[in-house]
C-alpha cells in the first residue's frame, strides 16, 4: 500500500494540501479528481517522494518515508513511478527516445535490451527511437515516458493528468497499456485527472474514485 | 524569410570556421617555411610601412610585423586558451557545487565569489604572478585564478534553473543520484554556456598578458606575443606609425570573433528548440 496520511503542503503562505490522506492499494486503479489548482500534482509529487510535505506521513508498503528526493533510498524511490502531465518538460531535450527509456535501466544496472521490448509494447518503432524530443509529437513522447516509467517495474504508478494533452486514440492506447501492466504485475495505479469521465471509464467497477475536494477536510 | 536568416547563419559559420582554419594553418606552418627570422633586428629597414617586401610593414627594430604576428598569435592564443580553460574549470567546479548543494554551502561559496570580486583583479593577478618567476605559467595561473567568478555565477544560475525542471524530477524518481544528475543532465546542458564564457575570456586573457608584460611581470620582452607587440607598437604610434600595433590588434579580434561565432552556433545546436523557433 502506498499511503499518504494527513499530508500538508504549502508554497510560501499558500496552503495547497491541508491534512490530506489517500491510499493507493496494489492491484487496483484509484482515481483522484479535482479542479485545477486543488493540489493534485503536489500530492502526486509527495507520493513519488519528490516533494517533502510540511506535515503528515508517507509510507510505501509499510516503510515510512523519512528522506526525500535524491536522499531517499533508490530502491524506495523506484518503487513509485510518476508519469508527468507534459512529456516535453519531463524528458531531457538532449536525449533520444531510446536514451529516455534506457536511462532507468542504466541507473539500476539492468540489461538494456529490455528497452526495445518496452518501446515495442508502447508502439514506438525503431526509427522513432533515434529521434530527439523536438523531433516527435507529444503523443509519441508520452509513450516513451510511459515506457520509462514501467522500465523498472514499479509497484505503484502515478499518472498525473497523463493524457490531458493527447488525442483520444493515444489516450486509449496509453490507458490500455497501463491496464495490461497492472493486471500482469499487480501494481497499484493512481490516476489523477480533472476529467471525471475518463476516470469513470478507466476505473470501472473494481476501483474507487476519490474526489480531492472531498478529501480536502478529511483528517 | 526563414531560409534567408538560416543561410546567413550558415555563411557566418563557414566564414568563422575558414578564418580559424587559415589562422591555424598559418600558425603551424609559417614558422617551418619562413625565410626570415622573426627576431632578426635590421635597423636599415626599421619602421617601414606595409609594402611588397613586408606586407604588414616592419617595427622600429626592423622586424617583420607579419611574421611576428604569426609567432605572437601562437604564443598569445596558447596563453589565452590555457588561462581561459583554467578559469572556466575552476568556475564550473565552484558553480556546480554551489548550485547542486544549495543551502549553507551555496551561501558560503557565493560569499567567497563576492570576496574575490571585491579585490581589483589586476592587482590580485600581480600578487599571484609575484609568487612565481615571470613567464607563461605565471600569467596563466594569475589570469585563471582571478577570472573564474563569472563562470561560477553563470554555472550556478543555470544549475538553479535546471534543478527545478521536471526532467530532473523524473531522473530522481528513476533512482539517479546527485552525481549522475550532474554528469548526465547538468554538465551537457552547461557545456555550451561554459564554452562561451571560456571563449569570451580569451581576449581578456590576452589583454592581461599585455598588461602583465608591460609591467615586466608577464612574458619576456623579446618574445613575440600579441600583447608585447601591441605594447611595443604603442610607442611608434606617437611617431605616426600605425601598423606595428594595428595588425596585432586585428589578430586578437579575428580569432576571437570566429571562435565566439562558432560557440554561438554550438549553443543553438546542442540545446535544440522547435524548428519553427530556430527559424524565427
Image: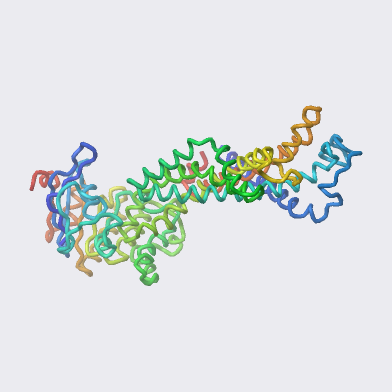
| Residue B236 appears in the rendering | yes
**Left or right, B89 with reference to A106:** right
| Residue B253 appears in the rendering | no
User: Which of the 4 quarters of the picture holds residue B2?
Assistant: top right
Q: Closest to the observer: B137 or A128?
A: B137
How is the rendered protein coloured?
A: rainbow
**Left or right, B6 with reference to A211:** right
The residue shown at (60%, 46%) is B262
Placement of A104 over or under B31, stated as above or below = below
**Left or right, B40 with reference to A98:** right
Locate residue B140, reporting x and y percent: 60, 48
Locate residue A81, reporting x and y percent: 27, 59
Q: Closest to the observer: B156 or B61?
A: B61
Q: Closest to the observer: B255 or A33?
A: B255
Placement of B10 over or under A154, stated as above or below = above
Residue projecting furthest to the right:
B44
Q: What is the count of numbered marks?
A: 0
Quarter of the figure with the N terminus of chain B: top right
Q: Closest to the observer: A132 or B253?
A: B253
Locate residue A181, reporting x and y percent: 25, 66
Locate residue A193, reporting x and y percent: 22, 49
Amino acid at each position: 500500500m502506498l499511503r499518504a496520511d494527513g499530508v500538508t503542503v504549502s508554497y510560501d503562505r499558500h496552503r495547497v494540501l491541508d491534512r490530506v490522506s489517500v491510499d493507493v492499494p496494489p492491484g487496483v486503479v484509484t482515481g483522484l479528481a479535482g479542479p485545477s489548482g486543488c493540489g493534485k500534482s503536489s500530492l502526486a509529487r509527495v507520493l513519488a517522494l519528490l516533494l517533502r510535505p510540511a506535515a503528515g506521513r508517507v509510507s510505501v508498503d509499510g516503510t515510512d518515508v523519512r528522506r526525500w528526493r535524491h536522499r531517499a533510498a533508490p530502491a524506495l524511490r523506484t518503487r513509485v513511478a510518476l508519469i508527468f502531465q507534459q512529456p516535453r518538460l519531463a524528458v531531457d531535450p538532449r536525449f533520444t527516445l531510446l536514451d529516455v527509456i534506457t536511462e532507468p535501466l542504466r541507473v539500476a544496472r539492468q540489461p538494456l535490451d529490455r528497452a526495445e521490448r518496452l518501446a515495442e509494447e508502447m508502439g514506438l518503432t525503431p526509427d522513432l527511437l533515434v529521434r530527439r524530443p523536438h523531433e516527435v509529437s507529444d503523443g509519441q513522447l508520452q509513450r516513451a515516458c510511459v515506457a520509462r516509467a514501467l522500465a523498472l517495474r514499479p509497484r505503484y504508478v502515478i499518472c498525473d493528468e497523463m493524457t490531458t494533452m493527447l488525442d483520444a486514440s493515444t489516450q486509449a492506447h496509453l490507458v490500455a497499456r497501463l491496464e495490461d501492466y497492472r493486471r500482469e504485475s499487480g501494481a497499484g495505479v493512481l490516476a489523477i485527472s480533472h476529467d471525471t469521465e475518463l476516470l469513470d471509464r478507466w476505473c470501472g467497477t473494481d476501483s474507487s474514485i476519490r474526489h480531492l475536494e472531498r478529501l480536502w477536510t478529511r483528517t | 524569410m526563414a531560409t534567408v536568416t538560416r543561410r546567413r547563419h550558415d555563411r557566418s559559420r563557414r566564414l568563422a570556421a575558414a578564418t580559424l582554419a587559415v589562422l591555424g594553418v598559418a600558425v603551424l606552418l609559417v614558422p617551418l617555411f619562413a625565410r626570415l627570422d622573426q627576431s632578426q633586428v635590421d635597423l636599415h629597414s626599421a619602421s617601414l610601412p606595409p609594402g611588397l617586401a613586408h606586407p604588414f610593414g616592419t617595427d622600429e627594430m626592423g622586424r617583420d610585423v607579419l611574421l611576428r604576428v604569426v609567432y605572437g598569435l601562437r604564443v598569445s592564443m596558447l596563453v589565452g586558451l590555457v588561462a581561459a580553460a583554467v578559469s572556466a574549470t575552476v568556475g564550473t567546479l565552484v558553480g556546480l557545487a554551489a548550485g547542486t548543494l544549495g543551502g549553507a554551502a551555496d551561501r558560503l561559496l557565493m560569499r567567497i565569489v563576492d570576496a574575490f570580486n571585491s579585490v581589483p583583479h589586476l592587482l590580485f593577478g600581480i600578487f599571484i604572478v609575484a609568487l612565481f618567476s615571470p613567464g607563461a605559467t605565471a600569467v596563466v595561473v594569475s589570469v585563471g585564478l582571478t577570472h573564474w567568478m563569472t563562470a561560477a555565477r553563470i554555472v550556478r544560475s543555470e544549475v538553479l534553473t535546471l534543478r527545478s525542471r521536471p526532467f530532473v524530477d523524473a531522473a530522481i524518481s528513476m533512482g539517479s543520484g546527485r552525481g549522475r544528475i550532474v554528469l548526465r543532465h547538468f554538465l551537457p546542458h552547461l557545456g555550451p554556456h561554459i564554452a562561451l564564457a571560456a571563449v569570451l575570456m580569451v581576449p581578456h586573457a590576452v589583454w592581461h598578458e599585455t598588461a602583465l608584460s608591460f609591467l615586466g611581470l608577464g612574458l619576456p620582452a623579446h618574445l613575440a606575443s600579441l600583447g608585447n607587440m601591441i605594447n611595443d607598437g604603442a610607442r611608434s604610434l606617437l611617431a605616426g606609425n600605425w601598423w606595428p600595433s594595428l595588425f596585432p590588434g586585428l589578430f586578437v579580434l579575428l580569432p576571437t570573433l570566429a571562435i565566439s561565432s562558432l560557440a554561438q552556433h554550438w549553443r543553438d545546436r546542442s540545446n535544440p528548440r522547435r524548428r519553427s523557433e530556430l527559424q524565427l
